Amino acid sequence: MIVVTGATGNVGRSLVAALARAGERVTAVSRGIAPARLPGGVVRIRADLAEPESLRPALEGAEALFLHDGGTGGHGFDARAVLAEARDAGVARVVLLSSQGVVTRPDSPSHGGAMRALEDAVRESGPAWTILRAGGFASNAYAWAESVRAERTVAAPFGDVGLPVVDPADIAEVAAVALRKDEHTGRIYELNGPAAVTPRQQAEAIGAALGEPVRFVELTRAAAYARMTAFMPEPVVETTLAVLGEPNAGELRLSPDVEGVLGRPPRTFATWAQRNAEAFR
């Protein structure tokens, strides 16, 4: 049996579905689970990583664990306590969804430091492990869904600076393989897309998926900062804007790892937009 934490997130939903299609017994764990969003036959358990003991019913009889912090950057829960629960339950394999910021922004507490500590906890926990360091998610474009629906507009800074964003479904498929096959033990994979795509190009791709134009409006850095600090801590905003506006060589590097694991190229942003067009209608 395989336990998937963050089971209702962009990666978790796809991972649960991929494992279910492969015939695996799956327990989906989240703080709140909507049954209609998970495949039939999947066991659903509400638990919180911030309360490690709440995971015990989910971990009973589990062979493998997908660990995802829900986008907290490793904050908000005691990773070593969670991993101790997994080890004590007999979990033999852990796959961690981490961030490329561990290597590209190591001095950033939000993007590198906390995730490095989480990776260290996984490596030292006892079970076999695989670490997935993901770049920016294609699904971050959901932040534009309301403005696209209302005004057919995308507003973002650095309109012509591209990054190779990764489709969460690709992360999920790599995780599904790593959770099931021994040859990925002790491996660290960097996961991103097949080519850099700019915010302006993302707006065009969303428009193509909808069959009508989507206008791009470029925000100044100051305007973007003001918007983002309304829901993100200032240090996180500073590093995020640095990545978006002045990506370093590591953030621009096209990794071969999705294709190396799956035997096919990573999906493009345009493919993601076509698959998720309904969110923008």
Image (cartoon, helix red, strand yellow):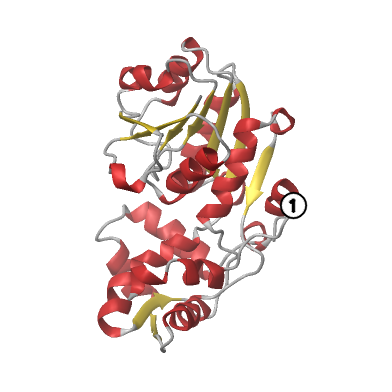
Q: Which image quarter is the C terminus in?
A: bottom left
* Residue 28 seen in the current view: yes
- Residue 41: image x %, image y %? 41, 34
122 to the left or right of 80: right
The front one of 33 and 252 is 33
Label 1 secondary element: loop
Which residue lies at the image location 31% right of the left edge and 55% below the top edge? Answer: 232
Image height of 30 relative to 79, above or below: below
The residue shown at (45%, 77%) is 206
Which of the 4 quarters of the picture holds residue 183? top right
The residue under label 1 is 263
Q: Position of residue 12 (x, y in %)?
A: 44, 44
Count of marks, rendered view = 1
Instruction: Give the residue at x 72% y 57%.
Output: 264
The disc labelled 1 sits on which kind of residue? Gly
Q: Is residue 31 above or below residue 243?
A: above
The one nearer the camera, 40 or 137, is 40
Is residue 144 visible to the viewer in this orientation of the structure?
no
Q: Nearer the viewer, residue 35 or 100?
A: 35
Give the vertical position of 194 relative to 171 (above or below): below
Q: Position of residue 187 (x, y in %)?
A: 70, 35
Question: Mark 1: few, some, or many residues within 10 Å (few <14, many ≥20)?
Answer: few
Instruction: Give x and y (percent) for residue 92.
Output: 58, 18
